[in-house]
């Protein structure tokens, strides 16, 4: 085979491979975006995403699990919260506010991970809600094996979905997609390393948003072949601050310095919270 033919075949192969990768990236980002929503009650707002948890019995609640940061729900003043869902007609998306209970007779309807800023709860969604349904059970949540096998490490770029100050990407209420790099080490074991730092500025409204990785990655150094890698690594918990004690002749105070870093609760904590969910009534 002459050099020209080899060059043409190689070019076609690369083009097809790159097109496949690009399609994979776009699809996974779009599916994650469609499963993420703004949640609000009074002046408290945050970000939530929906997982699907298969169940064996029929239930009016359905098999949807809402995931967010625990402090988002605990700070909400009312017994109800509003989830800004979306519907789709043809190719047009429309925002639809949906009120649902988060407390009943003074009892919280959500389940917390006692060791992490994670809350989950069963939620019944209107049948016309547009949602991707990509997150079946907890298979999309990263665990220690995934982090180790795919060598997730500091410097890896990840994606973050959220609503900074409640800002929406458009009138349909889609979240804003941003990115940042893992900024701390180590990541495992997650039983001990329950959070990691992200080079990402957190704003009010980002709390609870999913942090995920979506890329092509070689399993071993030097491999020509690669695989599509997608997992939710955790959720945004809060902004990291540096506290500086300041003493004067009159008083002692603490000055907080913004670092432009986010604190992410690892996905293992989300799995543990889901395992604690009570049976559906």
Image (spheres, rainbow, N blue to C red):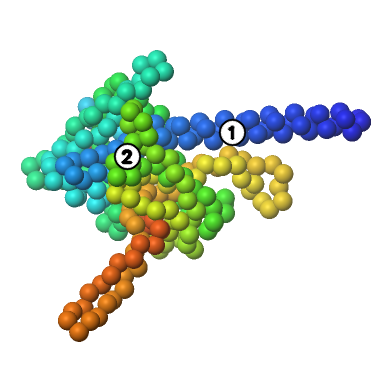
The residue sitting at 24% across, 52% down in the picture is: 71
For residue 12, side relative to residue 206 (left or right): right
Q: Earlier in the sequence, mark 1 or mark 2?
A: 1
Task: List the residue tagged with mark 2.
Answer: 167
For residue 231, side relative to residue 248 (left or right): right
The residue sitting at 49% across, 63% down in the picture is: 185
The picture places residue 74, in percent across and down from the top left corner, at 19, 50
Task: List the residue tagged with mark 1.
Answer: 22
For this rendering, which residue is in front, 103 or 276?
Answer: 103
For residue 152, side relative to residue 11 (left or right): left
The answer to whether 98 is drawn above or below residue 161 in the figure is: above
Q: Secondary structure at mark 1?
A: helix
Q: Is residue 281 visible?
A: no
Residue at the farthest bottom position = 249
For this rendering, which residue is in front, 276 or 110?
Answer: 110
Image quadrant assignment for residue 116: bottom left
The picture places residue 211, in percent across and down from the top left corner, at 42, 47
Image quadrant assignment for residue 91: top left
């Amino acid at each position: 085979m002459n050099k020209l033919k080899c060059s043409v075949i190689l070019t076609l192969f690369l083009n097809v491979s790159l097109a496949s990768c690009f399609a994979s990236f776009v699809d996974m980002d779009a599916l994650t975006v469609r499963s993420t929503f703004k949640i609000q009650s009074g002046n408290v707002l945050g970000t939530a995403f929906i997982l699907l948890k298969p169940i064996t019995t029929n239930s009016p609640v359905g098999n949807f699990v809402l995931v967010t940061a625990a402090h988002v729900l605990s700070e909400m003043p009312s017994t109800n919260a509003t989830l800004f869902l979306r519907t789709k007609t043809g190719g047009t998306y429309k925002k639809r506010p949906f009120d649902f209970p988060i407390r009943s007779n003074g009892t919280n309807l959500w389940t917390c991970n006692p060791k992490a800023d994670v809350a989950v709860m069963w939620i019944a969604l209107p049948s016309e809600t547009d949602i991707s349904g990509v997150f079946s059970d907890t298979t999309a949540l990263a665990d220690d094996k995934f982090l180790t096998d795919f060598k997730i490490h500091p410097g890896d770029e990840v994606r973050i979905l959220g609503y900074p100050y409640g800002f929406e990407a458009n009138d349909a209420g889609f979240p804003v997609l941003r990115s940042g790099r893992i900024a701390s080490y180590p990541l495992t074991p997650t039983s001990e390393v329950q959070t990691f730092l992200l080079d990402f500025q957190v704003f009010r409204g980002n709390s609870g948003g999913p942090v995920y990785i979506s890329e092509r990655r070689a399993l071993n150094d030097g491999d020509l072949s690669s695989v599509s890698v997608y997992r939710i690594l955790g959720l945004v918990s809060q902004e990291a601050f540096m506290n500086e004690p300041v003493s004067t002749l009159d008083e002692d105070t603490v000055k907080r310095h913004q670092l432009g870093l986010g604190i992410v609760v690892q996905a293992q904590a989300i799995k543990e919270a889901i395992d604690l969910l009570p049976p559906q009534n």
